[in-house]
Amino acid sequence: MSDTTMQSISSSDPDIEYEQTDVSVLIIGAGGAGARTAIELAQQGVDDQLVLGKRGHGDAHTTWARGGINGALGTHDPEDDWTIHAADTLNEGHFICDPEKVETVTQQMPDRLRELDEWGMDFSRTEDGGVDQRFFGAQSFRRTAFAGDHTGESLLDTLVSRAQELEIPYEENTMITRLISDGDSVHGAVGIDLDTGEFTVFNANTVVLAAGGYAAAYSRHTSRDDENNGDGAALAYDAGASLMDMEFVQFHPTGMAVDESDSEWAEWSGRLVTEAVRGEGGRLYNSEGERFMERYSPDQMELDARDVVARAIAKEIAEGRGTENDGVHLDISHRDASFIEERLPRMYQRFADLGVDLAEDPVEVAPTSHYGMGGVSVDEYGETDIDDLFAIGETMAGVHGANRLGGNSLAETVAYGTVTGDRIADRVTGSDANNTIPHSLRENLIQPHLDELRSLANADGEHDVMTVFEEIQTLMWEHARLLRDQSSIESGIDELERVQSMVSNMNVGPVGSESFEFAIDVGFMLTVAESVLRSAALRTESRGAHYRIDHTETESSWQKNIYVEQADIGGMRTWTESVDTPSPAVQAALDEGHELDYHQLE
């Protein structure tokens, strides 16, 4: 088990003390990916591990995933199989996905769904008691298993319960601010107890980043402001790892479009209206009452890929056919109230609390930043360029390519949690336990970083932290938005330099305070923002979620991944690499050309 001792560090402030925790495997992030990794380790006999959560136990962004989790069980469509799931994923990723990682996830998922069922997950059921599966956008068959419209919450409850059965060590309200890396290997991490404001140095042989994505770097997004700020990607980048596909940010078609001057509604701006509403038959109409998806996608309609539907909505709004709150109408009132309450209970209740009956009235929706397809570059097991540093879940890149297939995010968390946990378990031996952090890293990395954190605390600067935070979000929304062009992207890069100049002059509270936490997030978001903008400027084509109004065509020469890493002389270095080819079995499924017959739902 982990061992904790008190240490002091020689620095310009001799009073800086920290706890040191020695552990074999440190997992940063307590959502679905982190929990499933910990479970796999425990099931294989690895007890010397520790899971860190930035929030309270069970309070992770996984709970906000509503619609479902994919796996080719064939509950309703027995002709479905993992190769067709992989083909759908590659198609909707516009062939920028890493085929090997896609195949890993799609092969894993039938067994992972059965496993979750065995562990007691509250899946919605068919009449004969099987795990039900629903239609979901851009999928050829009904392969999205679900628990009403609260699948993520039910998934995490199940994983937390299993972790507690296995007595997996866990610490909550701990924020990691820096990884301890020499550029070749990782040796642990530096963190802060957000309750006490105390520093902790985690001495670890292996570190797993399962810290979420970067969608909240935008002003209109589906996350809470204090999560998905790019922690995982920025921590890995600072440690010497490379990032990949950062330009591909998914704008979910249906975030809530509200009157932000109305205090009752303002807090809901951009919040996710799950794709399950459309999966259960919801229809989109513009302000003129036209079901406009007939013009953009007459075959798949509202269940086309998220990038297609999001662009269609954005164009309707831009061309003057938007609603009062710059959205369009989503209407499922043709369904019975009892059906909506059974299949979409959380959505039905949310709008009922706001005075809207989904069985009677449409709701206003518009695109909102939802998911980063990019992230840390990893190998087939989730390991980064830095030895013993892994990144999984939304923190990793490779599975989703240019556009994520709905229902694949939760699938990725449990699939790669299993694969990564298995890989680490093979390495962990008694002789590996409690390696010592090299003295040079204590002097040259830990000491200066703790000095920086101490200097940041109680800084009496000119700029409010939240003002700087929101400046970054606004910059990203305006310059790295759904519809992009070179001029706007380059203006965003220039604007980012102005915002960076504000960071050293912020007014910050004490260690552990909300403003201190957001000040750390500002640093993470700056790294992510620059990587998105520079990658978007480099990709002179339109592909998936990256749509360039000055380069509207998809170019075969751009079937490449864009990588970002720290340059030797400072700044960011970018380069490209070609994408691998799928296996013969998946290529055969691609050649068969499977496609959803949307009109089964009419």
Image (cartoon, grey):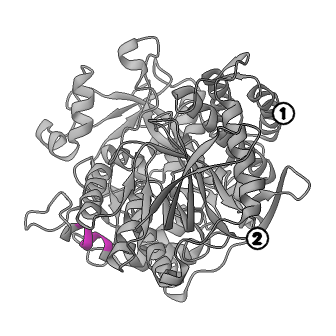
Which residue position holds label 1?
Answer: 494
Q: Is 600 in front, or is 500?
A: 500
Taking depth in this image into account, of 87 and 525 the one nearest to the observer is 525
Q: Which residues are magenta?
A: 112-116
Question: Is residue 198 or residue 499 the one in the foreground?
Answer: 198
Q: Which residue is mark 2?
A: 577
Question: What residue type is disc 1 on?
Answer: Asp
Viewer can see residue 524? yes
**Up-down: is 387 above or below 408?**
below
Secondary structure found at label 2: strand
Asked if residue 554 can be seen in this view, the reply is no
Secondary element type, mark 1: helix
Marks 2/1 in contact by CB < 8 Å: the verdict is no
Identified at 84% across, 33% down, the residue is: 494
* Residue 155 x/y as whole percent: 29, 57
Q: Is residue 38 magenta?
A: no
Task: Rate crowding at label 1 as few (under 14), some (14 to 19) or many (20 or more) other CA atoms within 10 Å.
Answer: few
